[in-house]
Image: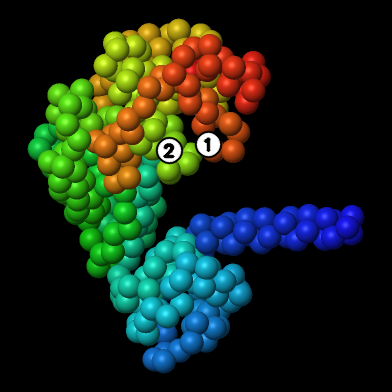
């Protein structure tokens, strides 16, 4: 029995190790040379054959992890033959998506949920398939070209993978992402739950961005929304760390100290009531839906359990008990 437990433990460690290896492989840019590389996938190629062709053409360093990722993401049967142009910083997963969608001779870029507009601009600048036109423009100047003249760009772009012809201007990609967010936000707002304490869909977007940053477990998004909306209705401060971090800007070094919570900024929801003035990140559709369809709950507090999930409480006494149980000496949230 002891030997069986040891073998199971070793098996678990091996599984975790393989998983981390695959994730790292999938997300690491390939750094191809030259900047744009033409590749060809032969017709009627199997997944293994495609992976070997990519190795032969010096796109992938090895075939096995690419094969495993394709199978784990259920994309094996939908990879398409053709001629493709890939930029030097494409990741193996982005390459897999390109082959999956048959986006031959096109570039791609992925905007990720929870990232800021600053990160979006950095990704556009580093993508060799994108034509740079906004390097010398401020965020406000970019918004005058992209949107309806909104002074703040944060949160107004939809996170997704976008495909485009090589040489497409960065401003064009931003317009696509902006228009996608406007369309999805308008549709979600039209179908929102009744009696929500938002003045408009922009406030809902702000809340969605907070939910995006607060939630490590996707299924908890509606519950997190319910907690924050309960606080809003009571006039209770939101007291959420991600807004404080956003307000700290470049001064944030990975830690929040007591003085940071006490230092007043427009984004400090410990010192100010209501929502911050703008979104704090790019929310995904699931967070927008959660903000507009919160779970009915009496909970006013939550604390992390250490595994990505949270313990919820409707009273401060219950919350303090959860803090002691899951995060001894953790500050009240």
The residues tagged by marks 2 and 1 sit, at their Cα atoms, a distance apart of 8 Å
x then y, percent, for residue 55 = 55, 79
Q: Secondary structure at mark 2?
A: helix
Q: Secondary structure at mark 1?
A: loop
x then y, percent, for residue 20 = 62, 55
User: Residue at label 2?
Assistant: 220
Residue at position x 24%, y 36% in the image: 292
Q: Based on the displayed image, in which of its 4 quarters is residue 305 positioned?
A: top right
Q: Nearer the viewer, residue 12 or 262?
A: 12
Q: Quadrant of the N terminus?
A: bottom right
Residue at position x 36%, y 60% in the image: 128
User: Residue at label 1?
Assistant: 309
Q: Based on the displayed image, in which of its 4 quarters is residue 193 positioned?
A: top left
Q: Nearer the viewer, residue 251 or 188?
A: 188
Whichever of callouts 2 and 1 sits on the residue coming sooner in the sequence is 2
* Other residues around mark 2 within 10 Å, as few (<14) / some (14–19) / many (≥20): some
Task: Specify the label residue 195 is tagged with.
Answer: none
Tell me: residue 175, above or below residue 11.
above
* Other residues around mark 1 within 10 Å, as few (<14) / some (14–19) / many (≥20): some
The residue sitting at the left extreme is 148
Q: Are marks 2 and 1 in contact (CB under 8 Å)?
A: yes
């Amino acid at each position: 029995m002891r030997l069986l437990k040891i073998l199971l433990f070793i098996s678990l460690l091996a599984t975790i190790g393989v998983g981390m290896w695959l994730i790292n492989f999938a997300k690491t840019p390939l750094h191809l040379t030259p900047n744009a590389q033409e590749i060809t996938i032969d017709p009627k190629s199997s997944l293994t054959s495609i992976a070997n062709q990519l190795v032969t053409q010096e796109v992938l360093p090895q075939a096995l992890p690419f094969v495993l990722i394709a199978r784990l993401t259920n994309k094996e049967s939908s990879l398409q033959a053709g001629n493709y142009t890939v930029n030097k910083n494409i990741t193996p997963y982005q390459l897999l998506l390109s082959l999956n969608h048959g986006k031959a001779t096109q570039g791609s870029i992925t905007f990720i949920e929870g990232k800021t507009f600053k990160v979006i601009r950095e990704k556009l600048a580093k993508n060799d398939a994108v034509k740079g036109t906004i390097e010398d423009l401020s965020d406000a100047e970019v918004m005058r070209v992209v949107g309806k003249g909104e002074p703040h760009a944060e949160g107004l772009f939809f996170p997704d993978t976008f495909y485009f012809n090589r040489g497409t201007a960065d401003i064009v990609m931003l317009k696509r992402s902006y228009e996608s967010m406007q369309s999805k936000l308008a549709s979600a707002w039209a179908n929102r739950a009744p009696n929500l304490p938002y003045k408009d869909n922009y406030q809902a977007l702000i809340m969605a961005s907070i939910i995006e940053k607060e939630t490590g477990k996707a299924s908890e998004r509606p519950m997190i929304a319910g907690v924050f909306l309960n606080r809003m209705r009571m006039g209770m401060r939101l007291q959420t760390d991600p807004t404080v971090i956003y307000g700290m800007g470049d001064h944030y070094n990975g830690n929040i100290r007591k003085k940071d919570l006490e230092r007043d900024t427009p984004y400090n929801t410990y010192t100010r009531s209501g929502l911050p003035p703008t979104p704090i990140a790019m929310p995904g559709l699931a967070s927008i839906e959660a903000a507009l369809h919160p779970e009915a709950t009496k909970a006013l507090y939550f604390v992390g359990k250490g595994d990505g999930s949270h313990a919820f409480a409707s009273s401060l006494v219950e919350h303090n008990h959860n803090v002691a149980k899951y995060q001894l000496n953790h500050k009240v949230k």
